[in-house]
Amino acid sequence: MSVIPLLLSLGLALVCPPLLLGVIHKTKAILTGRVGAPVLQPYYDLWKLLQKGAVYSRTTSWVFRAGPLVSPAAFLTAALFVPLTTPSALLSFWGDVVLWAYLIGVARFITVLAALDTGSSFEGMGASREVTFASLAEPALFVALAVIAKVTGSVQLSEMFGPVLGQAWRTAGPALALAAASFFLVLLAENARMPVDDPTTHLELTMIHEVMVLDHSGPDFAFILYGSALKLFLFSVLLVRLLVPVHIGVVWLDLVIVVAGLLGLAVLIGIVESSMARLRLIRVPQLLVTSGVLAAVGLLLVWR
């Protein structure tokens, strides 16, 4: 395969993530009767933060400074295994789906360590909530991926979300639909979206992800925001490839399909966040367990 489509996919992964956040914010503004910020506002915010200086507490160590760098680096590495506009990815090998999932876990791990390194009980509270909910979201994620692996007969991302998936919908449609529903709930939880977390709040009793990054500033905070956007992008791409397994073979047409699917999913997330209130913390585990049950039922349907 030509290297140009693969490089085009990598460029899409580098440039597109903040756009999804802009579409989500714009959708929420329109649905709530506001003008809202421009769709490209996340790019402006990142650029503004990159021009600022970073402030470090004397109580922090190198772990605090490494967090904003390791986290987006892990997401960028994970992006190399995701097939975007082509049936194959830049990096691919048998079982790479496990590495992809654990790269997501590495990013979370270093973010939690950076939060704990501040010595703040406030950030420690957020770190505790983060790992608690992650321990419930990760099983649902793996079971949903297991459903896709079972129907496609592969544990390689480029094959699991490749042309074979389109044929699998004809024979295992209900199971894949359950896996897609589970994956969507995991996407909301992993990316701190409503109804699991409110990314715009600064209330102590409701913060989860945002509380872990309060002490970061300047370029460090820009890297964290970009990493969060990239994480949303990665989950969104896999969900779009699951729901719209169309591979025409023409690079620009496949690119249009993927981008249209990503924008549509961003609008859907914006609608969900505008129409639902944030769940109480004690209700979030129930939502994640429901996600796991949906995926488990889908796995039972295809397990023979």
Image (tube, rainbow, N blue to C red):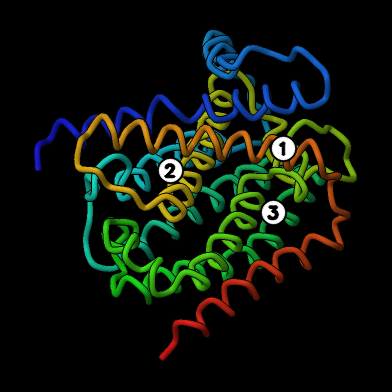
Please say if 169 is above or below 20.
below
Q: Amino acid at mark 2?
A: Phe
Foreground pick, 92 / 255: 255
Residue 32, image x, y percentages: 82, 25
Residue 218, image x, y percentages: 59, 18
Residue 103, image x, y percentages: 42, 54
Q: Quadrant of residue 206?
A: top right
Residue visible at 57% across and 9% down in the picture: 48
Residue 84, image x, y percentages: 33, 42
Q: Amino acid at mark 3?
A: Glu
Label 1 – label 3 distance at C-alpha: 24 Å
Whether the residues at callouts 1 and 3 have beta carbons within 8 Å, the answer is: no
Whether the residues at callouts 2 and 3 have beta carbons within 8 Å, the answer is: no
Residue that badge 1 annotates: 271
Residue visible at 64% across and 56% down in the picture: 185
Residue that badge 2 annotates: 75
Label 2 – label 3 distance at C-alpha: 18 Å
Q: Quadrant of residue 132?
A: bottom right
- Structural crowding at the residue carrying mark 3, measured as other residues with C-alpha within 10 Å and reported as few (<14), some (14–19) or many (≥20): many
- Structural crowding at the residue carrying mark 2, measured as other residues with C-alpha within 10 Å and reported as few (<14), some (14–19) or many (≥20): many
Q: Amino acid at mark 1?
A: Ile
Looking at the rendered image, the quarter that the N terminus falls into is top left
Residue that badge 3 annotates: 130
Secondary structure beneath dot 2 equals helix
Residue visible at 51% across and 56% down in the picture: 105
Foreground pick, 15 / 76: 15
In the picture provided, is 114 more to the left or to the right than 74?
right
* Precedes in sequence: disc 1 or disc 2: 2
